[in-house]
Each structure stands twice: as structure tokens, then as C-alpha cells.
Image: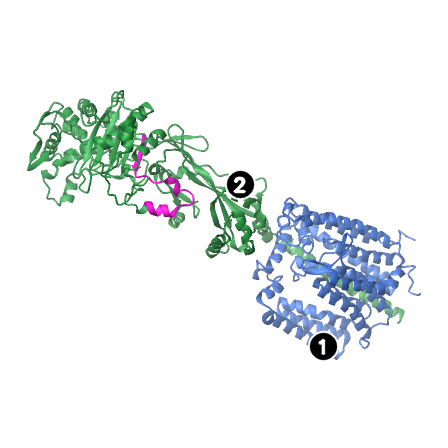
Amino acid sequence: MFNSQEFSWSVVFIWMALAITGLVAIYSATQGPVSQFLPSYIQENFTRQALWFGLSIVVLVAVQFTSPRTFQGVSYLFYFFVLLLMVITLFFGVEVSGSKSWLRIGPLNLQVGELMKPATILAVANYLTSRRNISAENMKTALTALAFFAAPVILLILQNETGIAVVFLALLPVMLFWSGLPYGISLLMVSPALVGYFTVLEWYWGLAAMGVITLVIFFLQRRTWLTVSSFVLGLLVVIGTEVALHQVLQPYQRARVESFVNPTLDPQGAGWNVLQAKTAIGSGGLYGKGFMEGTQTQLRFLPEQWTDFIFCVIGEEFGFFGSSLVLILFAALFLRLLHMASTHKHPFAQLVIVGVTFIYFIHFIINIGSATSVLPVIGLPLPFISYGGSAFLTNTLMLAICLNLDLYKRSFSIYR
Amino acid sequence: MHANKQKQDVRTSIRILQAVVLLGFFVLIIRVFQLQIIDYETYSPLSRQNSLRLEVVNPARGLILDRNGKILVENQPIYSITITPVNFNMENVPKLAKFLRMEEDSVLERIQEARDFSWQRTSRLFTEVPFEVFSDIQENIWQLPGIGHQIESKRHYPSEAIAPHVMGYLREATREEYLKSEGMRLGEKIGRSGLEMVYEDYLKGEYGTEYLQVNAYGQTLGTYGNGELNIPPEKGSDLITTLDADLQALAEKLMTGKRGGLVAMDPQSGAILSLVSAPQYDISRLAGRMDFEYWQSINTNSHTPLYNRAIAARQPPGSTFKPFMGLVGMHLGIITPETEIYNSGAYIRGRAYGDLAEPGDYDIESALTWSSNTYFFWLMDRIGSDGYLNDWADLINDFGIGPRNQIDLPFEATGIIPDSTYMNKAFGNRWGIGDLISLGVGQGLVSASPLQMAVAVSSIANNGYRVQPHLVSHIQHSDGEISYTNPMKEKIDWINPRHLQAVQKGMRGVVTEGSGRFYANLRDIEVAGKTGTAQNPHGENHGWFIAYAPVSNPQIAVAVLMENSGYGSISAAPIASLLIEQYLKGEIERSHVLNYVLNFEPKVEKEEELLQ
């Protein structure tokens, strides 16, 4: 059954490399020379992560002995089961730092929202590949797919896990796009985020982005109503963002949003993390300060440095060499996975692999973008590197499914 | 769904997604390159400033020791709790109060004061907290963000001899001084009087610097690196004084409850063995956290305890002036050792100047022994009438009476030896011989401090040398090197040994037969001296006694001024003799004299009790 020739060893190698980089960074952030100032439950993070890593290897191997058809078969069941778990969590979950998203199962604390990612990808992939191509006229399929996303997003917002909710919202256009949603409409779906982002930088940049997107949509689709909606939506986003920033939001809230552009607006408050993160990465230089030698890391100038700001640990202690190595590893992973998707014949497998790739990619962009203050700080972990057992396990599970689909691509026929 | 069409779509879609991924990758890697390579110079110093704190390490101030190595002034650690209000969470007030063992309200009040002072700066919340409180807070500092601690030191006076007027106190430097001097820190305490002031530059030492590693909560995590950047502080130099701690302790005890000043010195070198000004003040209450109430009280007390009478008093020396009159008279050729002057009970010149000595003929020796005024009225009359007034003033100045004697203490005052210029100024050119005659017996305008009289009597004891009074014999630097002070000692060349002998004999007679015989005549130490009583128009007369011993080889010279205590022979002489006894014998045998002095009460204006 297991054909090692067919198995994508390179992806496993990248996975291993990222996981070990993560363990090294977590070790440095929690076991450093002055770690006695840290609470013990944080000092134990390294050991826990190592255990999760071990468990994940088991999962990765075990998944390879499953039939790829199983994933398609159980996808709806799995989706509704996890959705039920999330509802249960909402009532019986454990609250950790403001988010009621943890379910205690025996000795494990499981973040159910993480498990929702593979569940949604599998279910949506199954649904979309069982339909015809989505056209601009037939939006019913797209709206049903939207419903698959809406349920977990609402639950995540209720659990106060807006970070993960953002991931789902960003994944939706990608999966619809792959399923044949016209390019223009796909672009229209992501345009509010892009226009909003540029508006926060400067309002005229937002207008420029709106103009470019509208132009691209016009050339792609040549539909008047689409072009007009893009124009109107873009304008509304620019105006809405400006009004929100200057009229609705309190100055401190505005400072939080804008701090990634200008951290000195509020150096003690919202700008603090941004400044310290940039200082950590910037002071790493070419070679870095060395393992466990990073002053910003070891002296706790960075908050959440084992999760949201773990890239700063790598950047500070291993310099440009270390941080670009991590970036290259991720880029290689994404390109390998996209290649996997493009060479697969089965649309379900394609869509699953693309979905998983973009789950990683969204985390990657937001996490490192926040740490390097390209983006506002949205608390998301870096896949395979940040501390967090549930995330590590589900990320590995998703990767294992992709590997499985790839491994059996010859036997996983498109014909039933 | 056409298979080819789908294949085409997949290929385009994958290109687009690859482009998105690569775009994301390049944006981030360019951003990282910008931060780590291009802007490295910006962020590297930022991270260093972040995690390093430069702290100034105070040097230990130099010690002050007596001539035998006994410590007179040392340092004692005091523990302070500090607060940086911006980092302090008000919810921690009850916890802090518990550690401080104080009421919440009073802690809150102090925190409020610190907040009002500065939101960002660290200020002292409580100083001189007990060590247990300090170590409790130190242990639990992580629970109290914004709270800090520091160890400072204050002066401590372990000896029975306190000598506040010699040691001096420290006070915070003023803003002007801080701005003027390089390397001084705001809030630094500097010597404000006494040796602390004169030897400030030696005592203070050199600041050290320490680079401390701090974390984001401001907790200090120890020294940076291996401390290779640190500069250790250099301890201040120690002063080895000429004081004799036992003698000083006795002198202070004897002067308790009295008003006046005394100086005891080695007549051969000018080394001061004891220097007391009464009333004294409790210098330890001015150390560390200053007791402001006490400071106010000693500043406003009518007996002016801060005033150093031993070096700054200006009182007529009375009859203690006579030996110097004699020497000047003989040098000017007006008298010889054999010249005899008849005392009829008063000297008549325009009016009668009284003389309490038995009527009869007196030469210089007996005139001193019996303190005949007539002899010296006559002598002063001659000096004035023969136009020697300015010569007389110069010659008296040579003994150290009048000018400053360059003692290593601040605020030394000059005395007054009126020459014609002075008289012109004082009397507006309308002065005559009648205004001069009383100067001959050390009354009227003539005035001197105990220090001046001690220097003067020393030159009689050491056969005609002017010595420079000094309190520090050498300075021991922290590197072990020693620098010696170089006090002056000059022969007064005009003094004739034969003249000096006559005066010395006369002064010995004062103690054996004259007014000093009751209290100053020791059984096995030959003391020579002269009593004096300064007329005080405002109240009880001031008593003086100057003395030296042993006559054959003088080792101690003493000058004592007792304000408002009547005759020198009964007020100042017993004190001087007890000091001589203590210094030369090491103990006091005449307990009756000791008790007499301890119970002696001056007739001061009783508006306020004399301080301890």
C-alpha cells in the first residue's frame, strides 16, 4: 500500500525543519537564562510542545494508512461533529485569556476552533466538487459554500476567537476561486480587505487600490454591474474606514489600528509591541545575537513571544539568515503543495490541498506581517513554529491529509 | 464541464495562486531585509538601550579617625524603598502596606506625593526602613511592579567623642552647586561644615558606573556581561586627624551644659588634640534622613549651637593677654625682665584703673604670677604715648592673636588687635591714650578666639615658634598611598629667650602661687598658665585660662573660654587642668575637680535651656 516512491518526502522534510525551528525558538523563549521570572506553566511550554510534536508524528504516519476516499466520505459528518463540539465549547468550554474556545478532554486541552479548519475545508471541498462550475449567474452554490463558512465564523466570534475567524473569511474567496468562481468576483471578494488596508496607510492609497482593482475587474469580466459594484464597494470601504478611524473610534483604538504604520503614536500602549517586535528583528542583523542571547527575547520585551511574536525570537537570535530560512521553508512548502494540487486529477483533492495551503499562507502572512509591522497586529500563530498543541496537531493533520491524497493520487480516481 | 477547459483553468488558477504566494514571500523577505540589514544600525542601539540601564554606584565616603586610629565617623547603610508611579498598580497598595508594616492610608499618602512629584521618575517612597522590611520587599519585588529599593549610606558616629564642630555635617548640594561642578549629581550630599566641608574632595571618592541588565518589567537581572564595562567606585580617602578621642570625649563632657569653647593642641606642632564649642548639637540627627524639626530648633536656638565658638568667638582675652604684653614690651625696650613697677592699688591716668593685686613692686614675673594690672596699664600707656601702637599690634599678631591661623576648618574668625587705623575707624579719629590703657590687660577692644589663644600660648611653650593649628595629620587614599598635611611652623625671630624665660616663670607662678593654684596645680605635672576674666557689659563675665604642661617639655597647650562663668580661675582653669591631667596621665585622679566642673553652671540668660 505505502509506496515510498510516490510519497512526498520533501514536504515531510520541510515540516520537520519548521517544527524543529519552532522547538528551538520556544526553548529559547521559555528556558532562557532568566526564565525563572516566568510562571511555571509557561516554562513547561517547551516540553508540552515536544510531546505534541511526538503525537503529531504518530498522526502523520497513521493518516497515510487511510484510504483517501474516507476523507471525502466522512467530510459532512466530521464537519457537523466539530460544529457540535464548538457549540458545546461555547457552554462548557474553558476560558483562557478571554477566549472560551478550549475543551478539556481527559488530560488534553483542545482548541476546537483549530479542528474546524480541516473540517470546513473537507466539507466545502466535498460540496463544491459535487457541483458544477460556479458562474457569475449561478451564485446559489457560492452562497451555500458561504453558509459552510458562516457557521464556524459566528461560533468563533462568540468564542472571542476573532483571529481564527479572520482566517476562515480569508479562505472563502480562495476556495470559491479554485472552484471556478469568476476571477472578477473573486477579486471583488478580497477587495474590501485590500482597499481597507491601503486606506489605513493613507486614504489616497485606498482610493488608488480601489481604482486599480476596479480596472482589473473591468478587464477580467467586462460586466458593468460588477465594475460598478467594485467601484462603489471600494469607495464605501475608503469612506467607511476613514470615518471609523477619525469619527467612530476613540483615539486609543485608532492608535491600535494605526500603530503598525506609526508605532510612535502610542509607544507605551499599542505601539509598544510593534516597536519591540521591530527592534527585536532589526537588532538581529545578519547573523543574529545567537541562541538564547537575544536581549529582547530573553528580557521579555516581547509579549507572546512563544506564539504570536515567535518570528521575532528567530529574527533576533538567528538574524537575517535564520528569518529568511524560515521564509524560504514556508515558500517552498506552499509551492510544493500547490504543485501537488496542480498535478492531482481529482478536484476534491485539489481543492483540499489548495485550501490547506492557504490556511497556512494566511497564518504565515498575518503572523510574520504583524511581527514585521507590515500588517496590524492580529494574534495568529505561525504554523508548525508557534507554541500551541491543538494548532500544531491540526496543522499536521491537514498536511497528513494532503500527503495522503498525493500519495494515492493514481488510485484515487475521479470516476467512482 | 469540458476536460480541456478545466485543465486550462487549473493551470491559470495555479499560476495565480503561485503568484499570490510568491508576492507574499517577497513582501516579507524584503521587509525582513530592510529591518535586519538596512535598518540594523537603528534597531541595534535601541535594543541595547532597552535592556541596559546605566547606574551610578556611589563610592563609600572616607572615614575620619582619631590620632590613634579610633573611628570617629564612618558610614552606615540605610535602606530605601522607591517608587516609579507610572509602573505602579494602585491595586497593590494593600500588599505594599503589608510588606512595609504600615497603615494603608499613610502609604497611599506617600504614593500620592510621589505621583505629584513625577509620574515617570523614580522617587524615594520611604527612607531608612528597617532591614527586615527592606529584605521582605526585595524578595517580593516581582509582585510589586513599579516598586524598587536602594541602599544608600549615611554618616554614623560610633565614638563617644562626637565633635560636631570639627566633623561637620552633610547636606544636599544646591542647584547652583550642582550646575557649577562637573560630576556632581542632583541630590548628592556634600560637606557643609567642619572637616566634611574642607576635605570634601578627598572624602567623597569617585563615582563608579555599573551596566545593569533589566527586563521589560524593569526588574534588574544583575550586572551586564561579566561586568567588563563597569567602572568600580573609588572609595573616598580616610582622614587621620590629630584629635585624641579620649581627650575629646572628656572635653565634650566637661563642656556639657556650658557655653564657650576650648582648644587643646600639641604646642610643638600645632596638632589639635581637642576642640570643643559649647553648646554642641547632635550631629547624628542631621545624618541620613534629616530631622527637620531638630534642624529648625538648632538654627533658632539663642545659644547658637551651630556657631563654632572655639574658632570664631571674639571675646576680650582679659589677663591671659598679659604674657604677650610682657614679651612685646621687653622687645620694644620699654621694660626689661628686671623692670619693677609699683602698684598702689590702682593705676591713675585721667581716672583710676583698678588693680586687685597686693600693693607693692612687681617685675614681669611677679606681675604675671599675681596678675597685677598696674604693670600692664603702665606698659600700654607707654606703648601708646611713645607711638608704638602699630608695632605693638604687629608684634601681637605674630603670636597668632588677631589674624587667622589657617586651621583646616571653615569659618575661622579673626580677632581684634586695634592699631591706629582701627582706632581711627572705631572712634572717628577722636581717641586718646585713655582708650588704649585697658587694652594692656586684654579688655576693651582687644578680642580673640580660644584657638588664637591656644596658638599664642603654644609659642610661649615651644620657646618662640608660631605653629599652624591643624586637625588632619595625614590622608590615607584608597590605594594605600598616604599624603601628609604640611602645617607651617615658624620661629618668631624677635623673641628673646631671656624674656621668654621670665614670662614662663611668671606663668608657672600663676599655677603654683597665683590664681591658678586652686584648680590648675597638679601634683606631679608642672603646669604653667594664666587665668583671665573678660569684662562682659551684657552679663556675667567670661572666664579664660591658657596653659601648657609639662613646663620642662610641653606636650599640651590649652586655651579655654567659658562664657558667663565668672573668674577664669574658677571656671576655665579647672577644665584646662583636667584636660592636661587626662592627656598626660591618661586618667583623672582629682575626682572632686571633675565633679566640680560637671556640676558647674554658667549664669547664662535663662530664656532657653542649653542643649546637650
The numbered mark 2 sits on a residue in which chain? B
Q: Distance between the residues labelled 1 and 2?
A: 67 Å
- Which image quarter: residue B263? top left
Q: Where is residue B580 in the image (x, y as percent from the top left)?
A: 29, 26
* Colour option used: by chain
Q: Closer to the camera, A328 or B77?
A: B77
The residue to which callout 1 is attached is A229
The residue that disc 2 covers is B230
Chain identifier of the residue bearing label 1 in the image: A
> In the image, residue B423 lies at what x, y percent?
15, 41
Determine whether A105 is above or below B557 in the image.
Answer: below
Left or right of B238 on screen, residue A84? right
Q: Colour of chain A?
A: blue
Residue located 74% across and 75% down the image: A218
Amino acid bearing label 2: Asn
Percent across and percent down for residue A93 are 74, 60
Where does the magenta region start and end?
B272-298
The secondary structure type at the circle numbered 1 is: helix
How many marks overall? 2
Furthest residue in direction right, as rendered: A416
The C terminus of chain A appears in which quarter of the rendering?
Answer: bottom right
- Going by the image, does B408 lie left or right of B98? left
Q: Residue at x 58, y 67 (%)?
A: A250
Which chain is tinted green?
A: B
Crowd band around label 2 with a 10 angstrom C-alpha radius: few (<14), some (14–19), many (20+): some
User: What amino acid is found at the position of numbered circle 1 in the picture?
Assistant: Ser
Q: Residue furthest bottom?
A: A224
- Marking on residue B436: none
